[in-house]
Amino acid sequence: MTQHSTGATRPPVGAEGAGQIQFGVFFQGVNSTTIWSSEQSGSQTEFESFRRIAQTAERGLFSAFFLGEGLRLREHLGRIHDNDVAGRPDGITQLAALAPITEKIGLVATQNTTYNEPADLAYRLASLDLLSEGRAAWNIVTTDNAWTGANFRRGGHLAHEHRYDRAAEFVRAAKQLWANRGGVDVDGEFIRFVSERVLPRSPQSRPVLFQAGDSSQGRDFGAEHADVIFSAHPELEGATAFAADLRERLTKFGRARNELAFFPGATIVIGATPKEAQEKARWVREHQISPATSLRYLEQFWGKDLSHLDPDGPLPSEDPVVAVTDGTRGSAFQNAKALELAQQWREKSEALGLSIRDFVIHLSSQRGFVGSVDEVADTLTELARSGSVTGINLTPYLVPSGLDDIVDDLIPALQERGSYRTEYPGTTLRENLGLPAVVEDLVPAGA
């Protein structure tokens, strides 16, 4: 066997006590967090929006530009959801277009292990990694519902309990392809193929692997395979507990504690003063959740048209017509026990004195940080020094201008505190994330 090593050799930024925070940016597709009605809001599909956000993020020394993925247009009460994004470019294609107009920022594509095949996807990701000179990454996701499966030639779907079984075989096969550069014969329960494709390695050896599962099975999967974990725990207490749990799981798979970076997702709203920031945050939430949006949010759980209701009035007294919600609007709306939920929500909204719109704003408040520039800079500095968070994956509430105040105001304040870098430490994504080098046991073809 041949030992092959490439990538960062400096101490990992994600290590405990490193003391600096990083940023990534999540360019969303369908969502209710982008303020569509603002005059500053741009297209969600035109290349100019992608270009501006990616280049602004790189000016701010962000580690990564991350694209989500949708395998089918979402539906609302049996019709195409008109707040969706139709015709959005394929993620790898979009990132390939951004590669030559950026230099250091990582390019992260969400790609599904249920409806792709390893030999093809591994080759396309390796192509992006090679052409971007070592800046590509793969956000590994699974799908387990028949609604999505019906959009594919072979139809059907993967049983919920097997989604990570196929994903694990898929990722192991991809790693084998990247390590051997072809000559791979895989005969698993879910994955079977023979491949002879060959590509040279990129400067970081292979794409960086991102993952976001938060169930126990998902955490185990991340601990075995991922380089970076997206999480839903940006606050200090939750981030510390989450990181401790994942680091403990790493030992089961023979991995070191510094082999995993943590990027919780969050929105940041800043102002010149705390009061200004709070006022801006309220403006953001009221524009994210319009009267129509609030009714459609409830409709997904009630399973029927509620347009006759006043968004400024109480929650509907009528019961839902569905027992369990489906996933046609996305996982956040899936598998809820509608009747029980409706009763709980009525009681809670009445106790809090909230209208339909105010209650939906309350329910869907984004994880994140609100405050003056100095307040948020101090909070992020504390997070960084805890060693529980490598970086924050930011979701802008405006496209494409949503990073401007982060780059122009917040990052300089972080740099003054010594808690944000002043230049990229390397040229590859792996280096800039502070991850240790890839060390692979290369198996000769046919062995």
Image (cartoon, rainbow, N blue to C red):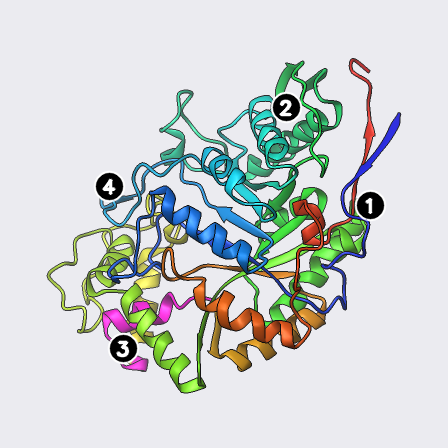
* Residues under numbered marks 4 and 1 in contact, where contact means CB atoms less than 8 Å apart: no
Q: CA distance from mark 2 to mark 3?
A: 51 Å
Eye-nearest disc, 3 or 4: 4
Mark closer to the chain start, 3 or 1: 1
Q: CA distance from mark 3 to mark 4?
A: 29 Å
Mark closer to the chain start, 3 or 4:
4
Q: Nearer the viewer, mark 4 or mark 2?
A: 4
Give how far across and how far down residue 340 sits, in percent. Answer: 34, 62
Q: Position of residue 206 (x, y in %)?
A: 69, 35
Q: Earlier in the sequence, mark 4 or mark 1?
A: 4
Three-letter amino acid code at disc 1? Gly
Is 392 displayed left or right of 199 in the figure? left
Residues marked 3 and 1 touching at CB (< 8 Å): no
Q: Which residue is mark 2?
A: 189
Residue at x 72% of width, y 54% of height: 434
Quarter that holds the C terminus: top right
The residue pinned by badge 1 equals: 254
Sequence-earlier tag: 2 or 1: 2
Q: Position of residue 327 (x, y in %)?
A: 36, 45
Residues at marks 4 and 1, CA–CA distance in whole angstroms: 46 Å
Residue type at mark 4 is Ile
State which mark lies toward you, 3 or 1: 1
Mark toward the start of the polypeptide (4 vs 2)? 4
Residue 380 visible in rendering: no
Label 4 neighbourhood size at 10 Å, few (<14), some (14-19), many (20+)? some
**Where does label 3 land, which residue?**
354
Q: Which residue range is magenta in the image?
A: 351-367
The circle drawn on residue 80 is 4
